[in-house]
Image (cartoon, coloured by chain):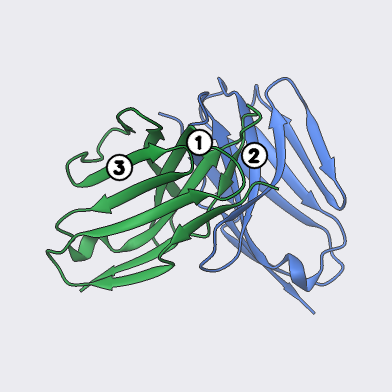
Chain colours: A blue, B green
Amino acid sequence: KQEVTQIPAALSVPEGENLVLNCSFTDSAIYNLQWFRQDPGKGLTSLLLIQSSQREQTSGRLNASLDKSSGRSTLYIAASQPGDSATYLCAVSRGNNRLAFGKGNQVVVIP
Amino acid sequence: GAVVSQHPSWVICKSGTSVKIECRSLDFQATTMFWYRQFPKQSLMLMATSNEGSKATYEQGVEKDKFLINHASLTLSTLTVTSAHPEDSSFYICSARDPDGQETQYFGPGTRLLVL
């Protein structure tokens, strides 16, 4: 059974600092890995999707890396802003769109 | 972009009653939709895969007679929580598979269920 772990569970950073969020998974036989953003009481917004054959993906201030062999992914958010405050979820695909999620990294960016 | 809606956004019901939650793809056809459940401070757990015109596929440990799924059209899937109990109180989120065949999903805003 695929287990997805996200560390740290929660963190607070001052505005302008870079954020580093970690995700690990136990079964390296994944189809892809995605990072999502979830605001309180809301659904999910897809941020980045990394195929299993890729090493990283970038979108604006966001960069996600994938090391499939070691079962790790890292999401970097450069120059954090208060609007980045949210919970960030990591999910790995087992194929057929069946996603296994971590519990999330709850981020607060302090103005 | 692809938009998925859910109705209702929140519902309170008495123990023993049934509750239906709708998931709609607004601007695309979704042959496959997914239902998730999320407890506070916990991860989203996939409950079932809903396929248009066929029976849903349930994940291990999810009671199919408790959580009835119907996907009668290409834009609508429904989840009915039958004989709801307080332990069914949770945040239910649906998603729809990308219509272009990409391995990604578009998520609805979620439905908060509270069973008294």
Question: Identity of the amino acid at label 1?
Answer: Leu
Please name which of the two marks, 1 or 3, marks the residue nearer to the observer: 3
Q: Secondary structure at mark 3?
A: strand
Residue at 40% x, 65% y is: B8
Whether marks 1 and 3 lie on the same chain: no
Task: Give the residue pinned by disc 2.
Answer: A34
Q: Amino acid at mark 3?
A: Ile
Q: What residue is rendered at 28% in x and 33% in y?
A: B60
Q: Position of residue B105 (x, y in %)?
A: 58, 40
- Quadrant in the rendering for residue A38: bottom right
Alpha-carbon distance for marks 3 and 2? 26 Å
Residue topped by disc 1: A99
Question: Callout 2, which amino acid?
Answer: Gln
Res. B17 image quadrant = bottom left
- Circles 1 and 2: CB atoms closer than 8 Å: yes
Q: Chain of mark 3?
A: B
Of B26 and B9, the residue lying toward us: B26
Q: Which residue is mark 3?
A: B69
In the image, A51 versus A104, the foreground residue is A51
State the residue in front, B61 or B100.
B100
Residue B11 visible to the viewer: yes
- Which residue is most to the front? B73
Horizontal side of residue B42 vs B87, given as left or right:
right
Where disc 2 sits, the SS reads: strand
Give x and y (percent) for residue A7: 60, 51
